[in-house]
Amino acid sequence: AQKITQTQPGMFVQEKEAVTLDCTYDTSDPSYGLFWYKQPSSGEMIFLIYQGSYDQQNATEGRYSLNFQKARKSANLVISASQLGDSAMYFCAMREGPHNNDMRFGAGTRLTVKP
Amino acid sequence: DSGVTQTPKHLITATGQRVTLRCSPRSGDLSVYWYQQSLDQGLQFLIQYYNGEERAKGNILERFSAQQFPDLHSELNLSSLELGDSALYFCASSVAPGQGNSPLHFGNGTRLTVT
C-alpha cells in the first residue's frame, strides 16, 4: 500500500530565505510519480511540481525544486527566496504505476513565512 | 482557474439528512476523483471514476456513494449525515489512467457543515 510521510507539521522561514519541506514515501512499484501541492488559506489545491520515478534529474519549476533521492525514498520540496505569499499548507502526494491511478496524500506541512 | 467546477460551494445541513455534491471535470478529462479533507487534516481519497466506471475506491463510507454520468460530470451522495462528516470535499480530474505523470486538477471544494 502507498504511504506518504511528512514529518514536519509546521515550519517557519524568514522572507527571502530558502526552505526545505520533507517528504518520504513507501512503495513497491518501480513506476510512480511524486507531486507537491500548495493549499493557501483560501482552500484551493494548487499543483506545484512533479517528479517521475525514472526521471534522472531533479524537477524544477521556477522557485520550486524537488530534491529526489530515490534510494532513500525521499522527495523534498525546496522553495527558494521565500515570499509572504508562500505561507500555506504543502502536501506531498504519490501516484503509483500506470494501472493504479489514484493519488494519495501526506498529512501536510504548514509553512509560515516571516517578514 | 483549474477548470474543475464544484457546486455548491457551501452546504449546511442537519444530522440524518442526505446531500448531493456535484462536480464538472476539466474539459477533456475523463477521470474524476473525490477527496475528503476534515479540519486541519490531509486529503483522504474516497473514490475514482474513469469514463463512467468506478476505477478505484479508498476510505469511502457505505453511507456515501458516487457516480459519473455520460457527460462525465460526477455526483457524490452523502446520506445519514453525522457531525463527523463535516469537511471540505474536493473533486479533481485528470485525463486518463495510465498517465502516471499527470497531476490532478482540483476544484475549489464544497464545504459541508453538519449541525
Image (cartoon, helix red, strand yellow):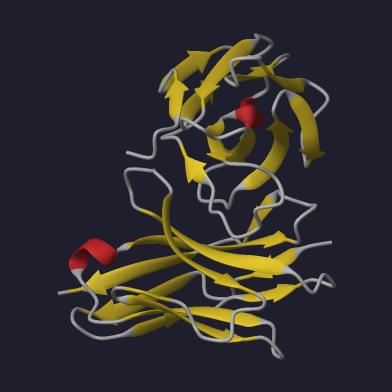
Quadrant showing the N terminus of chain A: bottom right
The percent coordinates of residue B58 (x first, y second) are 78, 42
In which quadrant of the rendered view does residue B59 lie? top right
For the point 29% across and 80% down, the residue is: A13
Is residue B45 visible in this depiction of the protein?
A: yes
Asked whether A84 or B12 is in front, the reply is A84
Q: Is residue A38 above or below residue A34?
A: above
- Residue at 78% over, 63% down: A2
* Image position, residue B65 (x, y; %): 75, 21
Disc count in the image? 0
Position of A49 compared to B98: left or right? left
Along the line of sight, the residue nearer the viewer: B13 or A39:
A39
Q: Position of residue A37 (x, y in %)?
A: 46, 59
Q: Nearer the viewer, residue B48 or B29?
A: B29
Quadrant of residue A83 within the rendered picture: bottom left
B67 vs A13, nearest the viewer: B67
Look at the image and tell me whether residue B114 can be seen: no
State the quadrant of the C terminus of chain A.
Answer: bottom left
Q: Quick check: B56 above or below B10?
A: below
Which residue is depicted at the point 73% across and 14% down? B80
Quarter of the image where one finds residue B17? top right
Which residue shows up at 80% across the image and 38% down it? B57
Residue B85 position (above or below residue A104): above
Extreme-left residue of the structure: A115
Q: Residue A108, position in %: x, y? A: 53, 62
